[in-house]
Image (spheres, rainbow, N blue to C red):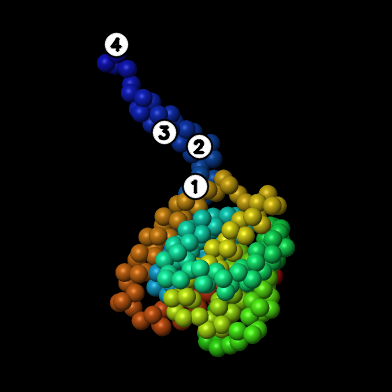
């Protein structure tokens, strides 16, 4: 009698299979749609991770832009937070001189926090949220293509830094993209290469955490997407590995131009779709 009794894991598999069959039978179109969306999300983060692996940036911009095609910007930001925080904490901690960077940039980071929190709710179901995201992506791309060279003297940092931080936070609150104008400012203050990489990691980490608090404060942080965010972290890591592996075989400048033109096209598309 005992020998014929099913094993516990077999019972679990049987229940899971029955549940899956029932779900497909009940609403096959909805099931296939959810699978296709998950596959699309995986593809987006592989692509975004790949670009970051090759050129060192672009993961949030690409992910937010493409995910906004199939979901609300607030949900896209919810999925993006974990991969962004994880990759940028690593980038921030890996450099040689984190504390001097923190000491120099804390007023800017405080401005980022204040600006992001001040814009609570801007990303939630706003009628022009996707259009604003498209504008931010287009400006980001045009700035990179124009190769702007701006210089900020040390004497101006105490007031320019917090102002840039607040504007960056407001842009992040409205679009989920927290690169502008912080990236331009961090390059303008003359940081050395390794310090710049750390500063970007610090800025993106603070911005991501502030955006998470922003969304949570208006009950828009979709915790049900936690599994999707964890999966996004994994596939983004695969994409980054592929990008880093292929970096030596590609011409980085050519790839950077393709990336920026693609981002510009995506931004224009989001604006056109929102206002049509």
User: Is 275 left or right of 84, judged from the image as shown?
Assistant: right
**Residue 221 x, y percent position in the rendering:** 62, 51
**Residue 30 x, y percent position in the rendering:** 54, 45
Mark-to-mark CA distance, 1 and 3:
20 Å
Q: Is residue 180 above or below residue 223?
A: below
Depth-wise, is mark 4 or mark 1 nearer the camera? 1
Counting residues from the N terminus, which is met first, the one under dot 1 or under dot 3?
A: 3
Q: Can you identify the residue that label 1 sits on?
A: 227
Q: Can you identify the residue that label 4 sits on?
A: 1
Counting residues from the N terminus, which is met first, the one under dot 2 or under dot 3?
A: 3
Secondary structure found at label 1: helix
Secondary structure found at label 3: helix
Residue at 69% x, 61% y is 117
Q: Residues within 10 Å of mark 1 (few under 14, many from 20)?
A: few
**Residue 102 x, y percent position in the rendering:** 55, 69
Picture disc at residue 59? none
Residue at 41% x, 33% y is 17
Secondary structure found at label 2: helix
Counting residues from the N terminus, which is met first, the one under dot 2 or under dot 1?
A: 2
Q: Can you identify the residue that label 2 sits on?
A: 23
Quadrant assignment, res 276? bottom right
Q: Is residue 14 above or below residue 37?
A: above
Secondary structure found at label 4: loop
User: Is 170 left or right of 244, judged from the image as shown?
Assistant: right
Counting residues from the N terminus, which is met first, the one under dot 4 or under dot 1?
A: 4
């Amino acid at each position: 009698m005992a020998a014929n009794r099913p094993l516990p894991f077999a019972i679990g598999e049987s229940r899971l299979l029955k549940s899956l069959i029932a779900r497909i039978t009940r609403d096959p179109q909805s099931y296939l749609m959810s699978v296709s969306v998950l596959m699309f999300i995986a593809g987006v983060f592989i692509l975004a991770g790949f670009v970051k692996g090759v050129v060192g940036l672009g993961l949030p911009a690409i992910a937010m832009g493409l995910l906004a095609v199939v979901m609300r910007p607030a949900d896209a930001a919810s999925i993006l937070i974990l991969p962004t925080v994880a990759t940028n904490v690593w980038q921030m901690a890996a450099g040689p001189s984190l504390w001097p960077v923190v000491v120099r940039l804390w007023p800017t980071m405080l401005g980022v926090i204040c600006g992001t929190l001040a814009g609570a709710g801007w990303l939630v179901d706003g009628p022009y949220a996707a259009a604003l995201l498209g504008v931010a992506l287009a400006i980001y791309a045009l700035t990179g293509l124009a190769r702007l060279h701006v210089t900020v003297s040390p004497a101006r940092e105490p007031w320019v830094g917090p102002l840039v931080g607040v504007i960056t936070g407001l842009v992040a609150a409205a679009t989920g993209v927290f690169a502008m104008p912080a990236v331009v400012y961090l390059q303008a203050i003359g940081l050395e290469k390794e310090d710049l990489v750390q500063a970007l990691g610090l800025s993106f980490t603070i911005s991501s955490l502030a955006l998470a608090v922003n969304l949570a404060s208006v009950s828009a942080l979709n915790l049900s997407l936690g599994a999707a965010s964890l999966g996004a972290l994994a596939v983004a890591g695969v994409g980054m590995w592929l990008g880093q592996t292929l970096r030596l075989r590609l011409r980085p400048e050519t790839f950077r131009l393709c990336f920026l033109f693609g981002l510009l096209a995506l931004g224009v598309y989001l604006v056109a779709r929102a206002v049509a």
